[in-house]
Amino acid sequence: MLQSISPDRLPPLELLDGASLFLDFDGTLVELADRPDAVAVDQRLRGLMHRLLDRLDGRVALISGRPADQVRTLFGEPVLTVVGSHGMEFRFADGREVQAARPEGLPAALDAMHALAARSPGVLVEDKPLGAALHFRQAPEQEAACQALAAQLAQAHGMYLQPGKMMIEVRAAGGDKGAALHQLMSEPKLASTRPLFMGDDHTDEPGFAAAEALGGAGILVGPARASAARYRLADVEAVLSWLEAATGQTA
Ligand SMILES: O=P(O)(O)OC[C@H]1O[C@H](O[C@H]2O[C@H](CO)[C@@H](O)[C@H](O)[C@H]2O)[C@H](O)[C@@H](O)[C@@H]1O
């Protein structure tokens, strides 16, 4: 059961000391864009990730709703552990890979989504290894139609209905970012450390709750709202600045 608090405390910089750090991607490390393919990882973020890996002796992982291999490609970083598809695809820094099965109903769900997008200008379909998403950021008037179709498809094909920011997704059931964090924390190198999870979206709430349950904390990114996170940072720039300050990097 998630806590329902509205975090308003800034995280102290010392929170990073000896921690294991788990980072969401969109809306946390990079600004949201009009389209999923319009985001990029710049030198500032790439350099920051290197410093974090160094400072925390490798105890850094990205846990994203995006496909794991896509996140790895965006970072061009082979030594980074990435969990994709909302906690269902693991790419460990040492080369191990764990992948959930692609849901059987996905091709039919994608067909139905493409049919909706074809008659709804601005709606985008995202084809993911374990899910399919309808994006309506460029067609907000289509939200109700997208939500209704996704709910129907999730029920018809036994998939999980995953809400997001200006998007709705059907995906493989059976995991989330909280379960992923628990699994990563069972790695020998992380086992006796304190987890910190930073994220901005609904899909990040299980991650906040898991971090708290393991003696660490969640850090919500964005406006205050009911959340299992203990701390809050205002936006992506605040996240990057906080991480830079916590790793001792001066402007
Ligand atoms: O868990 P995350 O790493 O935050 O990924 C969540 C979803 O991010 C992407 O969608 C979001 O970002 C897009 C680009 O900024 C934006 O256009 C969209 O409205 C957002 O919902 C990604 O496309 C999804 O697959 C992720 O699940």
Image (cartoon, rainbow, N blue to C red):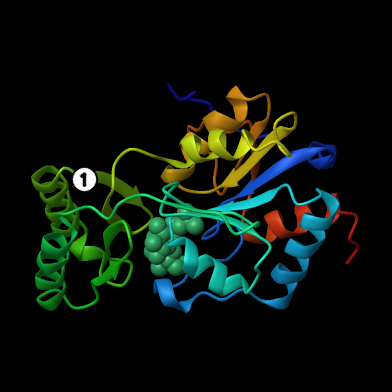
Name above or below for residue 209 compared with residue 86.
Answer: above
Instruction: Find disc 1 in the rendering and name its residue.
Output: 159
Q: Position of residue 146 (x, y in %)?
A: 18, 59
Q: Secondary structure at mark 1?
A: loop
Q: Is residue 46 found left or right of 104 in the rendered image?
A: right
User: Is 121 or 42 nearer to us in this picture?
Assistant: 42
Q: Residue drawn 11% across and 68% down?
A: 111
The answer to which quarter of the image holds residue 43 is bottom right
Q: Is residue 181 left or right of residue 33?
A: right
Q: Residue at x 31, y 47 (%)?
A: 162
Identified by mark 1, the residue type is Met
Query: Residue 220, position in %: x, y?
Result: 58, 42
Quadrant hosting ligand 1: bottom left
Total labels drawn: 1
Please tell me which residue lies in front, 115 or 189: 189
Classify the position of the C terminus by image quarter.
bottom right
Can residue 204 be seen from the camera position used here? yes
* Mark 1 burial class by Cα count in 10 Å: few <14, some 14-19, many 20+: many
Residue 234: % across, % down? 63, 50
